[in-house]
Image (cartoon, helix red, strand yellow):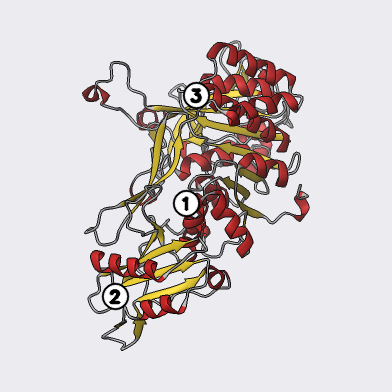
């Protein structure tokens, strides 16, 4: 494992989070974990890539299939829990298997159980874990968390209302609409990091409770200054003990201590059977600061100003944070709003904390962590997700520094990735030339196109395309160049890139040269229409020579965060 002191501040890991956790994350090195794992909803989620022209169909790439099956991998995960000595968790998991059988849900729970054990290991004693799920499996996941963390470590179940209503009746739904997600909050010990968060008061409450307005336009409500029994000064959250000088000193009688029923304030006694809650010193201070209002009887009351109140303490029913819409939407499936993660991180971590998201998807948790000045670790099993997160972070935080682990660093590791998963290899290669992936895992439907680079051609000012073809095999031939030329003609694309692991032959280069050049009429620069580059050249930093790349990113660009304006969250 990498010692925490030697680990970079911010890291992205490409790989299976179980492997990364065991290999790279040290015991008790993480302050807060947020995970939004697949929900086992048996759905396929697509990343939507927008074209800048609007004239071509949007491309969709399957990011992951949210479905699980009982197979050898599920059996291995189940047995892993037993082998590692977590008897309580294994007994619970085994009981679930006896109830559910060897089905898809059980496969999902076995996968989650072995990972929750590792997440518990890396969490600090003062740390917390938030597991985001939906009602499909939330009850089973809560049992698993009880088994791993202990039932006493359960803090609360948060209800996030992700929409106001679904009109599913038109689709034949014969039950209540489902508009909520579940967020299970656990701590590792009884001493966990916590900072109260607040929400704004309801306007009807403000109009009713804070109906008084002073000469400066500040709203306030009146508060009682008496108490049921003698005691120390009551604090409302502002300083009340301060020296008093001038004309007030003659009225104090050195009574700076606990209130008594007997004394009067300006000839006004407290209510019968009650006591002044404040000393004469503090009553004098309130009067000097214009903090007192008087009833018709002369009874003083305290002015409690609206703008000095923190708000309503946050409860576990969150209906004030809406799903991702508009400019925040990047096109990634199941994307959560940054505000949701900011709330969790602000409540359960300190500014120097390390935040871990082991299923980081499009990176909302680490985006929020970076925005709030925390350190972070993100893990995802698809290179598509990792490349999107890299772009998102650099768009939002231009000066950000982080490392990416697990992606190929040399030709040997690149070939190993190609052998293990050709699609992950293709997505990684096209990211090296800032192309958006194309075609996904469909076979034969993409015409040999693995990526698209959108260009801003100065001749027309309109966007056009460079088609990218990736070849990982050793047997490349001139026929592949002819195929790409034919696809360029069919698609009316002015440019093509042929990216290959194996160096091209002379006939291949000659065939590419026969595609001719494109000359920019404004700058008179000439560009080869079909270019061949090896993977080694790309890894050495060489890039294709193309006209200006269109500013539209592979997915929507993340808005740049104005860190100078970042303030404390309510």
Helix, strand or loop for disc 1: helix
Q: CA distance from mark 3 to mark 2?
A: 50 Å
Give the number of the disc on residue 487: none
At which x and y percent is residue 274? 60, 14
Q: CA distance from mark 1 to mark 3?
A: 25 Å
Q: Residues within 10 Å of mark 3 (few under 14, many from 20)?
A: some
Q: Residue at x 56, y 15 (%)?
A: 271
> Please, is residue 246 above or below residue 73 in the view?
below
Residue drawn at the location 62% of the way across and 49% of the way down: 376
Task: From the image, tell me which residue sits under label 3.
Answer: 104
Q: Pointer 1: what residue?
A: 423
Q: Residue 305 in the image: state x and y as whole percent.
A: 48, 37
User: For this rendering, which residue is in front, 162 or 147?
Assistant: 147
Left or right: 65, with 176 as reference point: right
Q: Residue furthest bottom?
A: 524
Identify the residue position indicated by label 2 in the image: 457
Q: Residues within 10 Å of mark 1 (few under 14, many from 20)?
A: some
Image x and y of residue 539, in percent = 57, 69
């Amino acid at each position: 494992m990498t010692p925490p002191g030697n680990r970079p501040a911010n890291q992205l890991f490409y790989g299976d989070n179980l492997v990364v956790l065991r290999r790279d994350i040290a015991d008790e090195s993480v302050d807060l974990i947020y995970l939004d794992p697949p929900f086992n909803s048996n759905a396929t989620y697509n990343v939507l890539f927008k074209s800048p022209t609007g004239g071509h169909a949007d491309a969709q790439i399957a990011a992951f299939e949210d479905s699980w099956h009982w197979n050898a991998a599920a059996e291995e995960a189940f047995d892993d829990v037993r082998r590692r000595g977590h008897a309580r968790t294994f007994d619970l998991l085994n009981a679930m298997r006896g109830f559910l059988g060897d089905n898809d849900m059980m496969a999902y729970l076995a996968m989650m159980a072995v990972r929750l054990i590792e997440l518990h290991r890396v969490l600090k004693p003062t740390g917390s874990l938030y597991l985001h799920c939906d009602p499909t499996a939330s009850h089973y996941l809560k049992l698993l968390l009880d088994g791993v963390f202990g039932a006493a470590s359960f803090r609360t179940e948060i209800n996030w209302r992700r929409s106001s209503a679904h009109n599913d009746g038109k689709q034949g739904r014969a039950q209540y609409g489902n508009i909520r997600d579940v967020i299970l909050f656990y701590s590792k010990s009884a001493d966990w990091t916590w900072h109260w968060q607040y929400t704004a008061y309801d306007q009807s409450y403000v109009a009713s409770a804070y109906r008084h307005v002073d000469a400066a336009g500040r709203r306030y409500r009146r508060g009682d200054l008496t108490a049921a029994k003698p005691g120390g000064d009551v604090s409302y959250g502002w300083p009340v003990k301060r020296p008093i000088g001038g004309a007030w000193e003659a009225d104090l009688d050195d009574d700076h201590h606990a209130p008594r029923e007997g004394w009067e304030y300006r000839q006004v006694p407290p209510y019968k059977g009650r006591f002044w809650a404040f000393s004469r010193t503090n009553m004098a201070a309130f009067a000097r600061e214009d903090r007192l209002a008087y009833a018709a009887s002369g009874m003083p009351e305290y002015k409690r100003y609206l703008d000095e109140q923190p708000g309503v303490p946050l409860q576990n029913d969150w209906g004030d944070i809406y799903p991702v819409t508009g400019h925040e939407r990047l096109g990634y499936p199941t994307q959560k709003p940054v505000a949701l993660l900011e709330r969790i991180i602000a409540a359960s971590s300190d500014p120097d904390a390390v935040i871990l998201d082991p299923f980081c998807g499009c990176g909302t948790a680490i985006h929020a962590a970076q925005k709030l000045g925390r350190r972070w670790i993100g893990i995802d099993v698809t290179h598509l997700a990792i490349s999107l997160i890299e772009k998102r972070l650099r768009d939002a935080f231009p000066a950000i520094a982080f490392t990416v682990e697990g992606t190929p660093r040399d030709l040997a590791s690149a070939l190993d990735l190609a052998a293990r998963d050709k699609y992950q290899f293709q997505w990684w290669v096209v990211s090296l030339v800032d192309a958006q992936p194309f075609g996904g895992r469909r076979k034969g439907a993409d015409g040999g196109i693995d990526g698209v680079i959108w260009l801003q051609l100065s001749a027309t000012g309109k966007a056009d395309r460079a088609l990218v073809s990736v070849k990982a095999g050793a047997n490349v031939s001139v026929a592949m160049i002819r195929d790409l030329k034919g696809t360029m003609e069919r698609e009316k694309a002015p440019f093509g890139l042929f990216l290959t692991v194996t160096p091209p032959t002379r006939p291949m280069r000659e065939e590419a040269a026969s595609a001719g050049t494109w000359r920019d009429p404004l700058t008179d620069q000439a560009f080869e229409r079909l270019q061949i580059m090896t993977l080694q050249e790309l890894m050495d930093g060489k890039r294709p020579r193309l006209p200006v790349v269109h500013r539209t990113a592979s997915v929507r660009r993340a808005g740049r965060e104005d860190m100078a304006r970042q303030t404390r969250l309510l």
